[in-house]
Amino acid sequence: MLCLVALLAALCAVTHGCPTILTKSQWGGRAPTCRTAMSTPVPYVIIHHTEGTACSSQSACVSQAKSVQNYHMNSNGWCDVGYSFLVGEDGRVYEGRGWTSVGAHAPDYNKNSIGISVMGSFTSKNPNTAALNAVKSLISCGVSKGYIKSTYTLKGHRNVTATDCPGNTFYNTLKSWPRFKA
């Protein structure tokens, strides 16, 4: 019986634990030039891919996160990374706007969603297991900490705007996840 209790406790920790989340200062990101507070918990989680280079080590993912931030701020004229979080194939999460700031990732959904983008292009392949698990863990973490409603709806970016994001292969996988609704 003791083993069963220990096993259930371990499973609960994995299910409700948070992945490694590097704050913007930990990955060397620039400070935002503006911030709009978001009311939480939010009812939606929107999944993206960056359509850029994938990364599988912390140093490569830091470089890629900086590249995404520079593109969003310098080219798009946004005040920060558009996404709430970036996820690398190193299994780590890189803070973008975080849990409580309105993003710039999905028109009409920015004020009521967490935007999670996996770094890379996933049209003909899936993110690796480390990245997929980090995304799932991040969602679970957001629910357990009260940032995401327990009744949230999961969507791919293409479900809320005209785009191929998050790539055909990743999108087909996403459709099998709990709480997904096109």
Image (cartoon, rainbow, N blue to C red):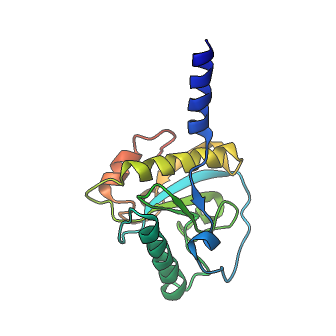
Residue located farthest toward the top when viewing the structure as drawn:
1
Is 159 placed left or right of 34 in the picture?
left
Residue 88 sits in which quadrant? bottom left
The percent position of residue 15, horizontal first and vertical second, equals 57, 37
Residue 53 sits in which quadrant? bottom left
What residue is rendered at 56% in x and 71% in y? 27
Residue located farthest toward the front when viewing the structure as drawn:
2
Q: How many marks?
A: 0
Is 43 placed left or right of 72 in the picture?
right
| Residue 46 against residue 1 in the figure, above or below | below
The percent position of residue 97, horizontal first and vertical second, equals 63, 68
The percent position of residue 66, horizontal first and vertical second, equals 50, 77
The N terminus: image quadrant: top right
Inspect this view and state whether residue 127 appears.
Answer: yes
Inspect this view and state whether residue 182 appears.
Answer: no
What residue is rendered at 36% in x and 69% in y? 51
| Residue 178 against residue 57 in the figure, above or below | above
What residue is rendered at 67% in x and 83% in y? 33
Is 181 placed left or right of 30 in the picture?
left
What residue is rendered at 55% in x and 61% in y? 115
The percent position of residue 148, horizontal first and vertical second, equals 65, 49
Residue located farthest toward the left when viewing the structure as drawn:
124
